[in-house]
Image: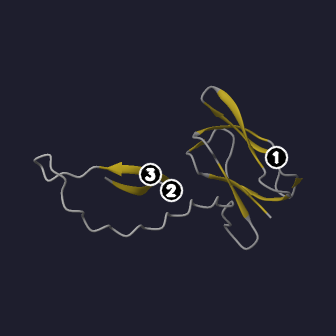
């Protein structure tokens, strides 16, 4: 019997394999394959910058813009609502990811947006 460590999606599993020659007799030991280093989990990505110093505020779900809570030039704290989307029969606030000033609002009330659509930008 041989013991191996197998890594799948960043999770290591210890497995034991009994090898046979097809007739029930143990087979000659195979050459061990080198272990590949597990891939690092992808790092969380910060909000993408659309222009120097600007942070894009994106829709996290598809929906319809039902209210715009902020104005261009308005100072916001992280977590303050910028746009309210109607999605899945709920109102879902899209909030400021960080403290800053609203640089642009890219949608209007009634607009349908897809997941990932840029709704606003902040400085």
Q: Residue at x 82, y 46 (%)?
A: 79
Q: Secondary structure at mark 2?
A: loop
Q: Which mark is residue 10?
A: 2
Q: Which residue, as the protein is rendered here, is positioned at the far bottom?
A: 52
Q: Secondary structure at mark 3?
A: strand
Q: Is residue 55 left or right of residue 19?
A: right
Q: Which mark is residue 14?
A: 3
> Which one is nearer the viewer's eye here, 106 or 9?
9
Q: Position of residue 112 (x, y in %)?
A: 58, 41
- Nearer the observer: mark 3 or 1; the answer is 3
Q: Is residue 18 above or below residue 112?
A: below
Q: Going from the N terminus, do you reach mark 3 or mark 1 first? A: 3
Q: Secondary structure at mark 1?
A: loop
Q: Position of residue 56 (x, y in %)?
A: 69, 59
Q: Residue at x 63, y 45 (%)?
A: 60
Q: Which mark is residue 88?
A: none
Q: Is residue 74 left or right of residue 110?
A: right
Q: Is residue 68 above or below residue 11?
A: above
> Which one is nearer the viewer's eye here, 97 or 7?
7
For residue 28, what is the image quadrant?
bottom left
Q: Which residue is mark 1?
A: 79
Q: CA distance from mark 1 to mark 2?
A: 32 Å
Circle 3 residues within 10 Å: few <14, some 14–19, many ≥20: few
Q: CA distance from mark 3 to mark 2?
A: 13 Å
């Amino acid at each position: 019997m041989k013991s191996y460590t197998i890594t799948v999606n960043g999770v290591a599993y210890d497995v034991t394999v009994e090898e046979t020659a097809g007739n029930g007799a143990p087979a000659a030991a195979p050459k061990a394959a080198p272990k590949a280093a597990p891939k690092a989990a992808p790092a969380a990505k910060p909000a993408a910058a659309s222009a120097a110093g600007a942070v894009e505020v994106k829709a996290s779900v598809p929906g319809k813009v039902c209210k715009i809570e902020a104005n261009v030039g308005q100072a916001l704290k992280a977590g303050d609502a910028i746009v309210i989307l109607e999605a899945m029969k709920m109102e879902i606030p899209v909030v400021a990811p960080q403290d800053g000033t609203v640089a642009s609002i890219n949608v209007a009330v009634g607009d349908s947006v897809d997941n990932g659509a840029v709704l606003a930008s902040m400085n």
